[in-house]
Image (cartoon, grey):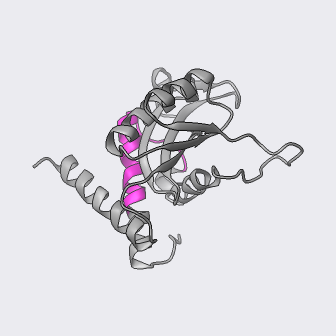
Amino acid sequence: MPKDVVFAQLNGLLWELVRRQEGREAAPSACVIDAQSVKTSTSLPARIQGIDAGKKIVDRKRSIITDTPGLLLAVLVTAAGVQDSTAGRTLLEQAATDHPGLRKVWVDGGYRKHFVEHAATLGIDLEIVQRIPGAGRFTSTPKRWAVERTYGWLMLHRRLARDFETHPHRSEAMIHLAMTDLMARRLTGENTISW
């Protein structure tokens, strides 16, 4: 059996065990999608990077979909110029295939109307969570804080503080490895990583 298949099965088993330990059902019914721009190493060729117009930097974008406790359902690493809706579409299709019980998804204002329509074709109710008017620069938004917390957990892994990988699929693998470590720590009750 190929190593990636064994790893995927192990990861799925850990995922189910963590959900059960937290008193949740094995299959998720709701999820959260978000994208994070991350700087890349200076040694990466410019052809595999993109420009994030909002941040005005050349980098990559990590798009993830998590369940409500913050466990990873799917990840997609793209050039930063890729729109959130485009990456989110791929993620949502993958998550809906792997977890047919998904019925609700929360996203931020960066996702467009056609993404809402695409979610409806998959039988998933998509809700855009708006920022609270008059709030400061960063405030926790209802429902979406779970995915932001997951990004925080992932950034504890030094290899993910910047994107060092030449190929996007290797970056995705590093995110999966970091999440496997986090799930194992949650199962064993071990403390968070300390450097």
In this rendered view, identify the residue nearer to me: 26 or 40. 26
Residue 156, above or below 91: below
Q: Residue 14 placed where, x, y %? A: 32, 64
Q: Residue 75 placed where, x, y %? A: 43, 42
Q: Residue 152 placed where, x, y %? A: 59, 56
Tell me, yes or no, whether the highlighted magenta stretch contains residue 194. Answer: no
Q: What residue lies at 38% left-to-right and 69% top-to-bottom?
A: 20
Q: Is residue 41 visible?
A: no
Q: Residue 114 placed where, x, y %? A: 56, 21
In the picture, residue 190 is in which quadrant? Answer: bottom left
Q: Is residue 62 visible?
A: yes
In the picture, residue 15 is in which quadrant? Answer: bottom left
- The outermost residue toward the right is 134
Residue 46, above or below 72: above
Q: What residue lies at 36% left-to-right and 61% top-to-bottom?
A: 26
Q: What residue lies at 39% left-to-right and 73% top-to-bottom?
A: 187
Q: Magenta stretch: dominant SS? A: helix
Tell me, yes or no, whether the highlighted magenta stretch contains residue 176. Answer: yes
Residue 29, above or below 52: below
- What number of labels is visible? 0
In this rendered view, identify the residue nearer to me: 143 or 72. 143
In this rendered view, identify the residue nearer to me: 174 or 72. 72
Q: What residue lies at 54% left-to-right and 37% top-to-bottom?
A: 125
Region of the chain picked out in magenta, as a range:
161-180
